[in-house]
Amino acid sequence: MDVSDRASVAALAAGAGSLGTLRTIVHTAGLSPTQADAARVLEVDTLGTDHVLAEFLDLVIDGTVAVCIASMAGYVARLTPEREHALAVAPTDALLDTLGPINLDDFGGTYCIAKRINQLRVEQAAGPWGKRGGRVVSISPGIISTPMGRQELEEGDGDQMEGMLDISPVPRIGTAEDIASAVAWLASAEASFISGCDLRVDGGVTGAIRGLMG
């Protein structure tokens, strides 16, 4: 399936609905800067979250949880508060137009913007999901040892990522298990009062970067 194609996501939701009650959905599909050009990264990473949350909404019952994987990169996106508000509330089919012209040669910057939009859209989706008894949250991983993460280290801006690891308060690369544990907790009854927000699972590196940026 293709999360940037709403009809494709609708078909997945219909298939899921035929299997029984929707308890948890974890949306992980996305592209990193070394995997596609900037325009495709924007299309998949920006629209995918909206399509999943919209098409699965009719399956939501009391206790259903959606966990969307964003990225710590969203915290370094340079968007004004006014632009963030516009991107948070725009209809899905107008989202990329609302974003307006950006530098498609800046693959890293484009990725940061897409992930910030993910965080903003999760905040907004919490309302409709909450009316049906569901919750929506996002997780922003740091540098994680997955095939995608290793590809970025080897083929992307590896020096920058190594520098981030050097300043991380938790001096190691993250693991898939780190993210899975956070997902399991957010989807559990123990996190039943948490919705419409983002959880950074990044070893503290976002805070360290902000400290350096002043």
Image: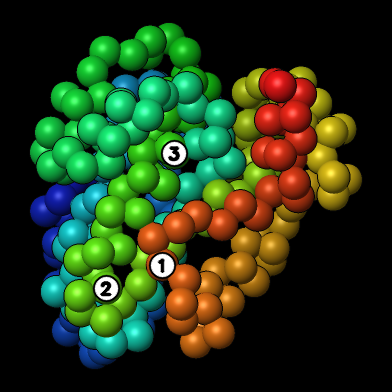
Mark 1 lies on a secondary structure that is loop
Q: Is residue 33 visible?
A: no
Say if mark 2 contacts mark 3, CB within 8 Å: no
Query: Which percent across, then down, holds residue 211?
Result: 75, 29
Query: Which percent across, then down, holds residue 137?
Result: 43, 62
Mark 2 lies on a secondary structure that is helix
Q: Which residue is mark 3?
A: 115
Does residue 175 lie above or below 165 as drawn? Answer: below
Instruction: Name which residue type carries label 2.
Output: Gly
Residue drawn at x 43%, y 37% as measured from the top left: 116
Instruction: Name which residue type carries label 1.
Output: Ser
| Few, some or many residues within 10 Å of mark 1 (<14, 14–19, 20+) | many
Say if mark 2 contacts mark 1, CB within 8 Å: yes
In front here: 197 or 201? Answer: 197
Residue drawn at x 52%, y 22% as measured from the top left: 108
| Few, some or many residues within 10 Å of mark 2 (<14, 14–19, 20+) | some
Tell me the quarter of the image containing the N terminus.
bottom left
Instruction: Name which residue type carries label 3.
Output: Lys
Q: Is residue 131 visible?
A: yes
Does residue 209 lie above or below 56 as drawn? Answer: above
Q: Which residue is mark 1?
A: 195
In this rendering, the label closer to the viewer, 2 or 3? 2
Query: Which percent across, then down, holds residue 80?
Result: 39, 23
